[in-house]
Amino acid sequence: MKVGVGDKERETTAVRDAALRRDIRILGNLLGNVLVSQCGEHVLQLVETVRQSAKELRAQPTAENRTLFWETIRAIPDEHRTHVIHAFALYFQLVNIAEQNHRIRRKREYERSGQDGAQQGSLRSVIREMREKGVDAAEMTSLIHQLGVELVLTAHPTEAMRRTVLEKHREIARLLEAFDDPWLTSRESRSMEKQLRAEIVSLWQTRAVRKERLTVLDEVRNGLYFLDEILFDVLPGLHLELEEQLRDVYPEATFEVPGFLRFGSWMGGDRDGNPNVTADLTFQTLILHFDLAMRKYEAAVHKLGQDLSQSCEIAGASVDLISSLDWRGPEPLDEPYREKATQILRRLRGTQNRFHSEGGDPDYYATPTDFLADIRLIEQSLLAHKGEEIVDVKVRPLLRQIELFGFHMATLDIRQHSEVHENALDELCRLGQLGPYRDLSESEKIARLTVLLQDPRPLVSPYAELSESTREATALCRTIRKAQDWFGTACIQNYLISMTQGVSDLLEVLLLAKEAGLFTLRPDGTADSRLHIVPLLETIEDLRAAPRIISELFANPVYRQHLAARGHLQEIMLGYSDSNKDGGYLTANWELYKSQKKIYEVARRHGVALKFFHGRGGALGRGGGPVERSILAQPPEALQGKVKITEQGEVISQRYSHAGIATRSLEKAVSAVLLGSLNVQTDKMKETEIYWSAILEQLSQDSFRTYQDFVYRNDDFLPYFHQATPIAEVGQLNLGSRPAKRRASDRIQDLRAIPWVFSWTQNRHLLPAWFGFGTAVQHYIRHTPDAAEEFRRMYRHWPFFRALVDNLQMALAKADMLIAGEYAGLLEDQELARRVFARIEDEYARTRQIVLMITGEEDILAGSPVIQESIRLRNPYVDPLSYFQVLLLEETRKGEAGDLQDVLLTINGIASGLRNTG
């Protein structure tokens, strides 16, 4: 029986997780000690009373226990309430660190267990699996050279944790990791406990939520922190690991792995709805990127010079290396590698001085390629003089770093709303005596833009007086050109257009690029184009229109010349957030899947290669969940060995704040892309997918109706949302530099998707991540014989449907109708609250029942006992924060004694407790 298998797995898990429980016990005891020293024994007793009462309510959720728990919460004296909330919030921070440490411990256990113990999702396991599936060395070589994984750090405001706090977390993680040392003495153990306690005291005494709203440059520095501290070293290591595993599994072949794994950023480039991001600020961002790159390279080359002490008399050196040196010493040069490193350092400093001093420096690197060439001289000389081991350890990581990070660290994407470009072109056309542009039909706009793109003359004089908005739009394109000239073309490659609804939206940006010299048509019909123009398809309507829009775009003669200049490659971004807010979980996912297949077919007909850019958030309602699951769930024809995905908010710190976790997260993503590239459908599989797609289409239509009826065609919904969620308070959390709303409006349509999802997570509804699915499936089953078994087959054999259902399971497990009901009690109109909440409870129960029917399990997440147990153990600690939040919202909204800072502290704590919040 399945229960027996689950019990056995839980028993195995319990033994395996003994060290995790030890870590949590150590941290919990230290937190208790700190609480006593900072606040007194009586506060610790209050925390213990609340915790015990929460556990009893979880064990027996009776009306009597609920009343007792509320009495416990309300009985906390006002002067101690903040301390109690802070204690629970801090507990989750420490538990998250312990769980992260345990993930690293488990990875090491797998690696120590020998070749047969390769961890699932590791590079070792996936390459062995591919060899077993018959992939020969030639096929693997081809696959490796088309491999591409791009992860883009965005400043989407869902990271509730301050960078100061994250740095303290890193130090706690380092100390905790040291406890696994088998040679640790009792004296060292006591010393580390003392250090841990000091860090916890420091955390206790540090403001948990930001006092000031982040600036854009704060966000830029936060993003660069992860590139600086973790990714600069992790990325080269992962490439070298892939080479090593390929050599082990394919000893008969030689592999040269290209730089396939890269990071990008939106921080300082994303101006959609954020007036704080200007052209000047974008250039300041790139200078920060450049300065970090120079700092990292200077440190690396200085270390290289210290290490490469080889004597020319003993080891020798190549003629090319010697001749590259500007040596004027009285004696023959004996340590050429050290001298080369010294001269490289001089040129690096000259490169930096070129941008930071008026006089500049005559000795500098014009491009990263020139810098790379100097390091290659060292590599080739060492290889020619028996220094292979030195090259592998000392030189190749730096070569990889230069290839991957250039002088820009991470490629900066530019994003702006289509309306901004339309308004700018309208003004420019009027100034250019062409008449109004905005009032033209779509076909008229396309015709005018096509003619203007073919005209070599500028649209207006560079001295024309422009409005602030148009001046900024044109200045941005000039800034992009300047940045590419200064820092290399890789510093900015993509211009993304939010709310793309037609071909004109892309041609407008191409025309603005032409005005700045980023796009040029030559007399011979060829073109030079320095930017990818990327449509961002966000709403359900836009996703459905996408194949037509892309087909018309590829038929445009000028745009085809642009594509030829860009290697016939078109990037297309898919928005998971607004599509979900627009149409609900099932419809959004299905439209995204369908759209990719149809766009791929359009591109195939036109001979254009595609790269899909997935704008996923951390939350399950925004495309969240394990990245490897998301990759494998894509249509087979859409993957083609390449994937580009956003990494947003708290997901960045969860995945990239520790080298071990970052390595594990990235190798799982790379492994998924490698496996996904093999997912070629047979004719039989295609037939089956056509049949299953017809089922999904019917489900989607039903789910869409159900969701829209409830959210957009329901007069009760808007007051429920604004009163039963902390949406107003979330807007005051200072999470990011961007406003929470596109316009000053209470409408759902004008609310950004991120605070929308964040708020539903806080009140434990998680409504965007599941609502509508249960009704749709139930209706289908009611009218279709044997449908239940067909859904089970779909879950077993269709990766898309399995990912859909597994993410649903996670959402259902984290949602909690007991807690959600407490938030419903915040409404002024309780009759309205009962109507809405009864509908939510009913749909939740239905969806839960349907999911269990599909998976064949007796409980949600029964197939993932580790995650299931983690949620179960966390609930009694999250619950008090939720009850405190409800109480505080009630008080602050009535103008009573509630403290807004305490509300924000509960938001922070719940985010830490639930994770995947935004």
Image (spheres, helix red, strand yellow):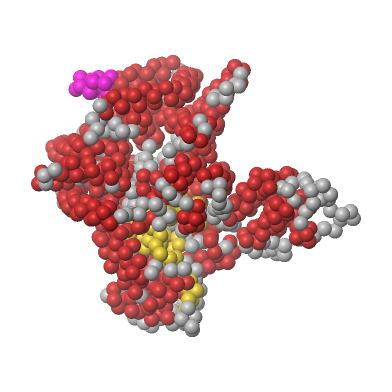
Residue 666 on image: x %, y %:
47, 45
On-image quarter of the N terminus:
top left
Visible residue check, residue 794: yes
Estimate the x, y position of residue 835 in percent, counting from the top left.
14, 39
Quadrant that contains the C terminus: top left
* Left or right: residue 485 compared with residue 672: right
Residue 70 lies within the magenta run: yes
Asked if residue 824 is positioned above or below residue 452 in the image, the reply reads above
Q: Give residue 398's position: percent from left, percent from top.
A: 63, 50
Front-most of 753 and 598? 598
Q: Residue at x 39, y 67 (%)?
A: 608
Quadrant in the picture for residue 619: top left
Q: Is residue 507 magenta?
A: no
Compared to residue 109, the image places residue 45 above or below, namely above
Q: Is residue 736 above or below residue 51?
A: below
Identify the residue at horizontal 36%, vertical 52% (top origin).
679
Q: What is the chief secondary structure element of the magenta stretch?
A: helix
Farthest right residue in view: 330
Measuring from the top left, give residue 510's x and y in whole percent. Answer: 42, 71
Total residue callouts: 0
Q: What segment is highlighted magenta in the picture?
A: 56-73
Which one is nearer the viewer's eye here, 293 or 864?
Answer: 864
Residue 192, compared with residue 424, is above or below; it is above
Q: Is residue 342 visible?
A: no
Picture residue at 58% right of the left edge, 55% below the top: 403
- Taking the image as shown, residue 645 lies to the left or right of residue 356, namely left
Q: Is residue 234 left or right of residue 800?
A: right
